[in-house]
Amino acid sequence: MHLIFNMYALWAFGTPLEQMWGTKKFVFFYFSAGIGAGLIYTLVNYYQFNGLYEIFANAGLNHNEIISILEAGKTNDSRITGMITQDQFNQIVSLFNTPAVGASGAIYGVLVAFGIAFPNAKLALIFFPVPIAAKYFIPIIILSDLFFGLTKYSIGNVAHFAHIGGAIIGFLIAWYWKKNQFKIM
């Protein structure tokens, strides 16, 4: 379903942007948002992982022991069970073992660019019966991703900070292009 929604969003929101910017500029934008999303996601994961990794190191485990535990996804080592909660253990195992793949971050960049270019476009959504302007809908989904990324309420393996990263990079590029569209170089 995630892939289907991504491809639908690329078609629905990317088509007007490609028509406005041209194919080369749109492809540059799309890949830039995707790469930026991956970088921001990686930085957030690095920060989260290192905070939990230090708990393992402070418990007296060496690097090889930590990696072995993370690869196994379980431990009975009393040095760990007394210093870390099951939720923290599950989180570090998930951060270590779950790869991030996909184009969701780039799609969020496209959504933000669409919102900048067409803020008053009415979006008729399946799960919301009243059409809503892009300038209201897009910030709501970005804020919901931020909420889910910062809390434990996330459903499934969704890279919320990749979404946020793509939205940030998409905003920066689209805002810059819009601001400078009539300037002669």
Image: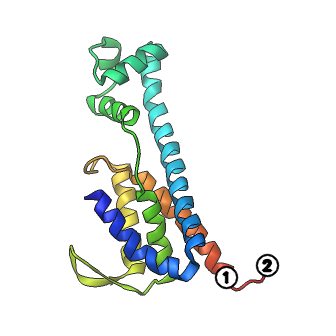
Left or right of 43 on screen, residue 70: left
| Residue that badge 2 annotates | 185
Badge 2 amino acid:
Met
Instruction: Mark 2 and mark 1 in contact? Answer it, CB < 8 Å.
Output: no
Name the residue: 43% across, 52% down.
Answer: 161
Name the residue: 38% across, 17% down.
Answer: 68
Left or right of 43 on screen, residue 177: right
Residue 116 visible? no
Q: Nearer the viewer, residue 109 or 149?
A: 109
Q: Nearer the viewer, residue 127 or 99?
A: 99
| Residue that badge 1 annotates | 181
Point out the image quarter for the C terminus: bottom right
Residue 9 visible? yes
Q: Secondary structure at mark 2?
A: loop
Q: Relative to 92, does residue 25 appear above or below in the rendering?
A: below
Label number found at residue 18: none
**Separation of disc 2 and disc 1 at Cα?**
10 Å
Name the residue: 42% across, 20% down.
Answer: 67
Name the residue: 29% across, 58% down.
Answer: 2
Q: Residue furthest right?
A: 185
Quadrant of the rendered image containing residue 27: bottom right
Q: Residue furthest front?
A: 23
Quadrant of the rendered image containing residue 136: bottom left
Point out the image quarter for the N terminus: bottom left
Q: Relative to 184, does residue 41 appear above or below in the rendering?
A: above
Badge 1 amino acid:
Gln
Image coordinates of residue 28 in percent, x first then y, are 59, 65
Quadrant of the rendered image containing residue 120: bottom left
